[in-house]
Structures are given as C-alpha cells and as structure tokens.
C-alpha cells in the first residue's frame, strides 16, 4: 500500500519524537541514510548545485536550493515537512529543487546567507540572480515545529519575482552577494587544513563535511589570528529586525507584530499590523531578506521602507543610529561559542537582572555579568585555567564599567582596533572583590 505524503510526514514525525533524537547521535548513519533516500528522488537534485542551474536554464523555472545540516536536530520537523507535505508539493513543482547537505565547495560570492542556521533556502534565476533568502529561527529553536506558513509565503513571493523578471532586475541588485576574500569555504585557512572539496563517502563522511556555521567561525579566525579587529558583520551576521525594535509575526514574517517603545522602528513611525513590501528598495520574500538588508547596511544612515497599512501604501525611513549593530543578540547562536573562545576565554555570561543586582549591592547602570558557565578545553578553558569560577560576577572588563549584555561585550572586545591583549577584570566572588587577568588564546 502506498502512503500519502501527509501520512508519511505524520509517521516520520511520530518516529522523530520517540527515537530520532537518539538516531541523530549516529551522525554518520543520518547522513548516509539521507543520501540513500534522496539521491534518486524524483523532485530533489541531490547535492549538485550546478546541475540545478542547468535544469533551471532548460526549464525556465527558478532554482530553489535547500541547505540542510542533516545530523543537526534543529529544524528537523521543518525539513521533514518540506520533503513530505502534500500541500507544499504543487508549489515545489514550479521550482527546480536542489538539496545541498554540505558547504565544502559552495561559491561564497553566491551563497551568502545566515550560516548559523541548520536549514536555509536560497532562490535563484538560472542566470544566478538571487530572488531571495529564507531561514527560520522559530524552527531552529523548536526541532518539532512543522509549520510551513512562512515558507509557503516566501516561495509564493519568489515566484512573483520570477514572473516579473527581468523587468525587476534592478530592484534585485542589493540582494546579490558581494566580493569575498575566499572563493569557497575550503579556501579559508582554518578549513583548508582539514577539509577537501568532496565528501569522503568511502570513509567517515561526517568528518569530511564542512557545516555552514564553520564558515563564519573560519572567517572570524582569519582576522583574530592576524591580531586584527573582527569586522562587525562577522560578529553580528544577519541581524534580526528586533535589533531595530520591530518584531514580525510567526505566520507572516513580513507583517509587524510589535514595535518596541523608544526604538528606531518606533521613531520611524512603524506600527503593529504594517506589512513590509520593500526594505532599502529591495522586495522581500521573508524575514531573512530583511536580515540581509541589515547585514549589508552601514554603521549609520537611513533605510527606506514601503509598506501596506490598512491596505494603503505608506513610505517611511528608519534611521540607523551609531552602534546599532552592537544591539544584536547573538548569545544563542552557534557562532557565539567560537566568539567566547576568542574574546573571553570560554566564559558564558549573562546580564544580572535588577533584583539580583540589588542582592549584591550593585546599581542598575553598571556592568554586572554573571558567569553562567565556563568552557573546559583549549581556548574555551582559558578563563577556568586563569582562575575564573562559575557564579563570579564581572563588574569591570578592560576598562568597561557600563551595563551591557554579553553580546555587546563580545563585539566590543573583538572589534577593538588595539587587537588582542590580556584583559584586566574586576569581579565579585561571594561579595568580595577580586582582580584577575584573562590571557588571550593564541589559537582556536
């Protein structure tokens, strides 16, 4: 008996909730099983982007490339839904679809997206013009989330752009990737030491695979090991719209759900219910497109928006205030781990709330970062070896005394034009002041 796609999805998710969490511990098996299932799939071209561009040119369809880290639990439910959903199937039929499971040899001038996500999608014209990007932190946080509303709307918007192409090509200029110092990930020194262009299917395939998040780590290491400031776009990649004070809805990622008081979004006049159509003159298909605009934005300036408010067109501009990028929350990104090794020797820090500050006799305006945890090995064990302990509270770091969260501290330290240097730190331990010095790791 042949199962419907919906039933297949239901069964696969039931399996996921019981045993797949254990199965993903077998990373090697997960990758090999994915290949066995998908290599000859009728819809999905497996791990071959160039074949996808060739088929897109022949068919006249846009090219949809899904990048999926198979061993990673995050986005597992969404990945299963995309592969098996009956409702999505007619929409996918309008694309040439490629499933890409490793990043070893991707063209970094073409594939510029949020490398910290385990499931991302880019949509191209056959001539390699990018229509848009998709990536969901909502699904990343909940591995069992199978909702496809935002994905469906993103693909529908991409098809609208494709139907209007090439008449709209000028409006897509800002969506295209820019020059990079390395053509592929395996050209970056940290990755070139360990990886080749091809996966080692005859050996340990997982150990031969470059994961997307390693790209950001490797770029940062190039600057850090050369004793140069790390560019802010590598510390705070693809900033969320919340950085400017606007929260978009979970079901329609271009509709504003909340506007934070006294934020850049509030000062621009944005309101809940507004539907964003273009941002910095770029047509959007998803929140990842909005993040891309911010990723490529300057330190200061204004960004125009066009939107719909109660069905009527509205044009506004949002002002980027000095140091806006430092307000990006990166504490839960996978890339934060490497940043902690570079900047704070593996300390995991959390800003104390006002109640905890009061209990320690600290005011609400000064630095008070609680040591939530410490790394154990290599550069991530540096703070522990230097004498730092869990539950210490850092109240001064390299002259920084004002209140700020861990995310901003990492950026301030790593973008310091003075480069690497030992950090003098004052802390509270059991309400007693101590002075320690944090050496700087020599390697990552």
Image: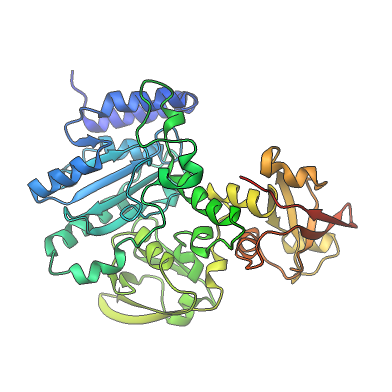
Whether 41 is drawn above or below 276: the answer is above
Q: What's the coloring here? A: rainbow
Decide if residue 231 is on the left or right side of residue 158: right
Residue 264's x, y, as percent?
Answer: 49, 77
Residue 194's x, y, as percent?
Answer: 48, 35
Q: Say which quadrant the N terminus sits in.
A: top left
Decide if residue 378 is on the left or right side of residue 1: right
Depth check, front residue: 342 or 300:
342
Residue at image point 21% right, 71% down: 170
Q: Is residue 253 at all visible to an observer of this figure?
A: no
**Quadrant of the rendered image containing residue 38:** top left
Depth check, front residue: 208 or 152:
208
Whether 63 is drawn above or below 32: the answer is below
Q: Say which quadrant the C terminus sits in.
A: top right
Residue at image point 18% right, 21% down: 2
Whether 104 is drawn above or below 393: the answer is above
Residue at image point 18% right, 36% down: 43
Depth check, front residue: 402 or 423:
423
Q: Residue furthest right?
A: 432
Residue 62's x, y, as percent?
Answer: 17, 52
Depth check, front residue: 327 or 237:
237
Residue 212's x, y, as percent?
Answer: 43, 44
Decide if residue 43 is on the left or right side of residue 152: left
**Quadrant of the rendered image containing residue 431:** bottom right
């Amino acid at each position: 008996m042949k199962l419907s796609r919906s039933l297949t999805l239901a069964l696969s998710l039931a399996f996921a909730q019981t045993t797949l969490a254990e199965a993903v511990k077998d990373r090697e098996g997960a990758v090999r099983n994915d290949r066995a299932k998908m290599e000859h799939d009728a819809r999905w071209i497996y791990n071959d982007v160039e074949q996808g561009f060739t088929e897109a040119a022949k068919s006249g369809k846009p090219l949809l490339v899904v990048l999926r880290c198979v061993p990673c639990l995050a986005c597992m439910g969404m990945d299963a839904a995309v592969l098996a959903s009956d409702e999505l199937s007619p929409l996918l039929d309008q694309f040439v679809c490629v499933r890409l499971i490793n990043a070893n040899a991707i063209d970094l001038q073409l594939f510029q997206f949020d490398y910290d996500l385990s499931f991302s999608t880019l949509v191209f014209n056959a001539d390699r013009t990018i229509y848009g990007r998709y990536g969901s932190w909502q699904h990343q946080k909940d591995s069992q989330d199978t909702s496809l509303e935002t994905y469906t709307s993103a693909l529908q918007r991409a098809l609208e752009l494709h139907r209007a192409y090439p008449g709209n090509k000028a409006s897509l200029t800002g969506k295209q990737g820019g020059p990079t110092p390395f053509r592929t990930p395996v050209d970056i020194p940290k990755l070139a030491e360990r990886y080749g262009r091809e996966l080692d299917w005859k050996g340990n395939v997982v150990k031969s695979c470059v994961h997307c998040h390693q790209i950001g780590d490797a770029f940062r290491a190039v600057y850090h090991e050369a004793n140069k400031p790390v560019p802010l776009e590598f510390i705070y990649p693809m900033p969320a719209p919340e950085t400017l004070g606007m929260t978009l809805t979970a079901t329609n990622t271009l509709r504003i759900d909340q506007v934070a008081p006294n934020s850049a979004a509030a000062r621009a006049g944005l309101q809940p219910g507004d539907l964003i159509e273009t941002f910095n003159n770029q047509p959007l298909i998803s929140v990842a497109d909005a993040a891309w605009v911010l990723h490529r934005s300057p330190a200061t300036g204004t960004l125009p928006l066009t939107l719909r408010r109660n069905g009527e067109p509205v044009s506004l501009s949002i002002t980027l205030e000095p140091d806006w990028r430092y307000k990006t929350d990166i504490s839960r990104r996978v890339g934060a781990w490497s940043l902690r090794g570079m900047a704070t020797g593996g300390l995991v820090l959390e800003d104390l709330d006002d109640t905890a500050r009061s209990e320690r006799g600290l005011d609400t305006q000064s630095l008070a970062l609680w040591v939530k945890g410490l790394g154990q090995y290599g550069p991530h064990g540096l703070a522990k070896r230097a004498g730092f302990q869990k539950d210490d509270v850092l109240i001064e770091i390299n002259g920084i005394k004002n209140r700020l969260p861990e995310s901003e501290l990492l950026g301030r330290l790593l973008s310091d034009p003075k480069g690497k240097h030992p950090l003098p730190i004052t802390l509270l331990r059991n309400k007693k002041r101590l002075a320690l010095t944090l050496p700087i790791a020599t390697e990552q």
